[in-house]
Each structure stands twice: as C-alpha cells, then as structure tokens.
C-alpha cells in the first residue's frame, strides 16, 4: 500500500526541554470535537520512558478525519519533577486531521512554556 493511501493514525511525544529528557509519566487525553462542540473521549494514556505512548493514541482502525484535541496534563508532570512554579497546568492542542495520513503531534515542554508542530 502506498503511503498516501494508508489509513491514518495519530502519535505524540513529549520532551522535557528544561531537563533535556523524554517526559515520562505525562497523562494525555484525546477527544474528537464535533462542529457543535460535542466532545467524545477516545483515549487516555501516559507517556512511557521514551516520552511516547506505547501505541498510537489514535490507531489506524479508529482513524477518521475531523477535529481533535489532545490535552497534556503538564502541571502534574512538572510538579512531580520539582518545577518551581505551576504556570502551566493543562496544555490543550486542538487540530484538524483532514486526510488519511500519519499525524505526529509532539510537545516540547518546560515549566514556563511549550511548543508543538506537526511532525513526521
């Protein structure tokens, strides 16, 4: 099967940029968000020692195009690792998956900021 005709799926990865390490133990939820704002919880998981989930957070057999929201429970993780402040708590990322493809949405996290992008 060619890459552009493969079923889509979603993965994520959390890196602790302040410590220079993968962020192990971050709770992550994934919701599908409908146009009327209705939300459906699809997954709740935690990152492993590599800062990744053990399996795609949205596997190929569950994939559908549409709007989604990943919520990273950053505050719990940061407090557990001695962050001096809890400026960040929940980090919601809302995005659209418009085609059957691999979507990778990493989070680069520090106690006072974060960044994300569509990875590969």
Image: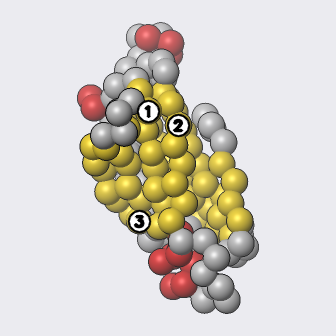
SS class, disc 3: strand
Q: Nearer the viewer, residue 111 or 33?
A: 33
**Residue 76 location (% of width, % of height):** 48, 77
Marks 2,1: beta carbons within 8 A: yes
Determine which quarter of the picture holds residue 14. Answer: bottom right
SS class, disc 2: strand
What mark, if any, has residue 27 been given in the picture? 3
**Residue 19 location (% of width, % of height):** 70, 75
N-term-proximal mark, 3 vs 1: 3
Residue at 50% across, 12% down: 4
95 relative position to 58: left or right: right
10 Å crowding of disc 2: few (<14), some (14-19), many (20+): some
Q: Which residue matches tag 1?
A: 67
Distance (Cα) linking label 2 and label 3:
19 Å
SS class, disc 1: strand
Distance (Cα) linking label 3 and label 1:
20 Å
- Quadrant housing the N terminus: top left
Say whether residue 30 is visible: yes
Nearest to the eye among marks 2 and 3: give it.
Answer: 2
Distance (Cα) linking label 2 and label 1:
6 Å
N-term-proximal mark, 2 vs 3: 3
Nearest to the eye among marks 3 and 1: give it.
Answer: 1
N-term-proximal mark, 2 vs 1: 1
Indicate whether 15 appears above or below 84. Answer: above
Q: Which of 99 and 61 is in front in this view?
A: 99
**Residue 10 location (% of width, % of height):** 44, 37
Residue at 71% across, 72% down: 112
What mark, if any, has residue 95 been given in the picture? 2
């Amino acid at each position: 099967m060619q890459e552009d005709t493969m079923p889509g799926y979603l993965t994520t990865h959390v890196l602790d940029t302040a410590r220079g390490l993968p962020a192990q133990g971050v709770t992550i939820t994934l919701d599908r968000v409908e146009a009327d704002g209705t939300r459906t919880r699809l997954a709740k998981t935690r990152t492993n020692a590599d800062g990744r989930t053990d399996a795609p957070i949205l596997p190929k057999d569950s994939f559908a195009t549409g709007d989604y929201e990943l919520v990273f429970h950053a505050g719990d993780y940061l407090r557990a690792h001695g962050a001096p402040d809890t400026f960040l708590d929940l980090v919601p990322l809302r995005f659209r998956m418009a085609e059957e493809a691999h979507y990778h949405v990493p989070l680069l996290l520090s106690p006072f900021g974060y960044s994300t992008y569509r990875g590969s």
